[in-house]
Image: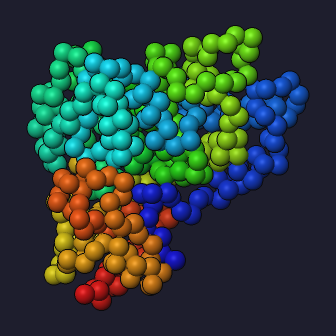
Amino acid sequence: MIYLDNAATTYPKPNSVRSATALALRKYGANPGRAGHDMSIAAAEEIYRCRTAAADFFRAPGPECVAFTLNCTHALNYVLKGLLKPGDHAVTSCLEHNAVSRPLHALSETGVEVSAAQVYPGDNDATVDSFRRAIRSNTRLIVCTHASNVWGIRLPVERIAALGHEYRIPIAVDCAQSAGVLPVDMADSGIDYLCIAGHKGLYGPMGTGLLITANGSGLSTLIEGGTGTNSAREEQPDGMPERMESGTQNMPGIAGLRAGIEFVKARGADRIFQHEMTLTRLLYERLAGMKNIRLYTDEPTPRYFAPVLSFNVGDLPSEIVGRKLNEHGIAVRTGLHCAPAAHRFFGTLEQGAVRVCPSVFTFRQEIDRLVQVLATIR
């Protein structure tokens, strides 16, 4: 199979990730941080190693700022519903995934106001100005994607964060599509809440995610329960990461995530990005010369895009194209990609789009084969 659905979940996983996950099932089988015996302590140490690796990779203030979640959606819900109250206002973008749009919609029914700033691909000045115009006196949060999961369009999150801090407004960034591929530096960017999928660009197992913030004590909790600390108190702990980590953690997944982070660090995120962008640009150039292909964005460039490309074959429903590609052993993603706002942006809400995303394990010959098969679809 030629697997090009890496924007949803990277596959295959590195051998080190598979080995770390299997080892955790054998060696760290006890509940971490809940007992004083050797296996429980060993499990807790492995979890701390992952916190340290994540904090180092994203240059967070410290490992205590790293909370483990089920996925990026889980982390975003923690921030949005833990921070916004009736009467507050939030600014987002017009390209958001449902992981942002749906929690904001639910909050709007409780009295939270939401504005979507227009994004101008290739013009960061205009995009930042759009966010500035959307800010109100009661704005309490800016939340936006780092890179569109449909079109690969990058938002200037560092500049948006600086804008927010100018008005004393925190920013939460959805890094589901960018973590491990695009540079994310919390120390320099000013991002307050970093929401990350562990199973995409970090090459960890599914069911892993991260919320990285030094401001976790300021968030209301969605889930309360056992944390292994201060058990005599009925109140949920105030400090990170325990405040966001009730119940038993995904020990094998966290071990695999640690290995994934170390894999990306060893390979070099810059090198991975260059490899994936080279393949994405190659695909764009080949498709641009085909009469039956509809492209929607400008040619992807490293400054303004992540390595994700969506297109259509004439007027064919994207699902039909995906089915035909699957018959040739090529796996892509079709439909709306859980991001109707992004499809509304380019007028593909009815047709959807065929999405291709390479990974570090994708070869040029696989892109050539995709183009060859697309040429036969009418």
Residue 180 visible (yes or no): yes
Q: Residue furthest right?
A: 37
Report the number of discs: 0
Of residues 120 and 352, the one nearer the viewer is 352
Residue at 38% over, 62% down: 357
Residue 301 visible (yes or no): no
Q: Which quadrant, please, contains the C terminus? A: bottom left
Q: Residue 354 occupies which quadrant of the picture?
A: bottom left
Q: Position of residue 270 (x, y in %)?
A: 40, 48
Residue at 58% over, 21% down: 243
Q: Position of residue 22 (x, y in %)?
A: 75, 53
Q: Residue 179 occupies which quadrant of the picture?
A: top left
223 on left or right of 127: right
For residue 94, above or below residue 185: below
378 on left or right of 127: right
Q: Residue furthest top?
A: 233
Of residues 80 and 14, the one nearer the viewer is 80
Residue at 76% over, 46% down: 24
For residue 240, above or below residue 308: above
Q: Position of residue 282 (x, y in %)?
A: 29, 69
Q: Residue furthest front?
A: 109
254 on left or right of 169: right
Residue at 65% over, 46% down: 253
Of residues 263 and 13, the one nearer the viewer is 13
How was the colour assigned to the protein in this rendering?
rainbow
For residue 4, above or below residue 135: below
318 on left or right of 2: left
Q: Position of residue 245 (x, y in %)?
A: 61, 28
